[in-house]
Image: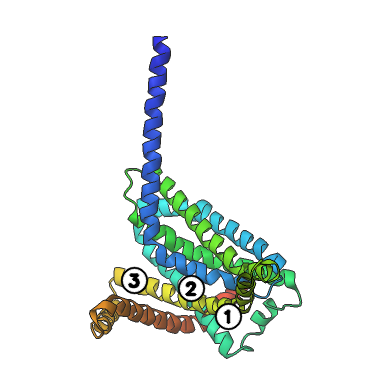
Amino acid sequence: MSGLLALLDDVAGIAKVAAASVDDVVAAAGKAGAKTAGVIIDDAAVTPKYVQGFAPARELPIIWRIARGSIFNKIILLLPVALLLANFAPWLITPLLMLGGSYLCFEGAEKIFHVLFPHGSHAIEKDMDVRDPGHLEEQKVKGAIKTDFILSAEIMTIALAAIEAPNVWMQAATLAVVGLGVTVAVYGSVALIVKMDDVGLYLARNAPTPVGRGLGRGLVKAMPTVMKTLSIVGTAAMLWVGGSIVIHGMEVLGFGWLGHHIHDWAYAVGHSVSAQWEAAAEWIAKATMDGVFGLAWGMVLIPLATKVIGPLFNRKADH
């Protein structure tokens, strides 16, 4: 009997340690997740544009496919790579992030370029041929998962830098919690946004009060504008995040003149307004300059990507 009591006591001790570890992981994940808030907002703003133009019945399945790809990106691909790089090759992290930031700049600049010059690329128009909805959906999902990979890499790297874990297993558990939590938050929000017009239609038809029906009609009328605005915000977010990643990477590698100038200019803008708006004005100025740099860098990359890198990859794929 005493042996059984001793065993139960040991089990209770192990359970307490496990519970404390879980609490530590959750607390660390919350702290690390807060550091990634800016990129999370960008991710949520970017994603809704990938379901524009599809039948309502395909919206949630597309979001679910992208969400599954996002979980695969974070947990299967990025988590082990982040841990290996952080523990064995931390010097590689900055160049890889700059490469990802450059891709975001390219994608954002390319979207603006094709708004200004809608017939500029026959290949892209062929890929986006709406006469084949299945092909268009595949292209959109692949593009969304590629963009998510870059944003997820930034999220996981920022989270890893914020984690104060005693060992690699705690790092891994915390990153996994951050990755899953961010994915649920982002794609849950996106699902609500893209289905809001259906909610409005339901209220307009079935709400028991005139106020409810008016709210439903207002939602239906407002959602096209909201989706268009989110698409614009998503493109701007790509340029902002991509530009800021590249500029920060340049600073880490010893080329900090541009980052220092942007900081000084943003500081000057912040101190040119009243004290209550100082922080907001400084942030807006810095984000704007990061985005302008991202657009300029993306425009430089467009001919390189479309005339050199793209054909090389296509030739390799053909072989």
Amino acid, disc 2: Leu
Position above or below: 242 against 114: above
Tell me how far mark 3 sits from mark 2, CA to CA: 15 Å
Distance from the alpha carbon under mark 1 to that under mark 3: 34 Å
Picture coordinates of residue 155 (x, y %)? 43, 61
Residue 41 lies, in percent from the top left, at 46, 67
Q: What element carries label 2?
A: helix
Quickly name the residue at label 3.
Answer: 248
Q: Name the residue under label 1.
A: 225
Q: Residue at x 42, y 20 (%)?
A: 8
The Cα atoms of the two marked residues, 2 and 1, are separated by 24 Å
Q: At 60% across and 62% down in the image, what residue appears?
A: 66
Residue lying farthest to the top in this orientation: 1
Q: Position of residue 88 (x, y in %)?
A: 36, 51
Q: Where is residue 298 in the image (x, y as percent from the top left)?
A: 47, 80
- How many residues crowd around disc 1 within 10 Å: few (fewer than 14), some, or many (20 or more)? few
Circle 3 residues within 10 Å: few <14, some 14–19, many ≥20: many
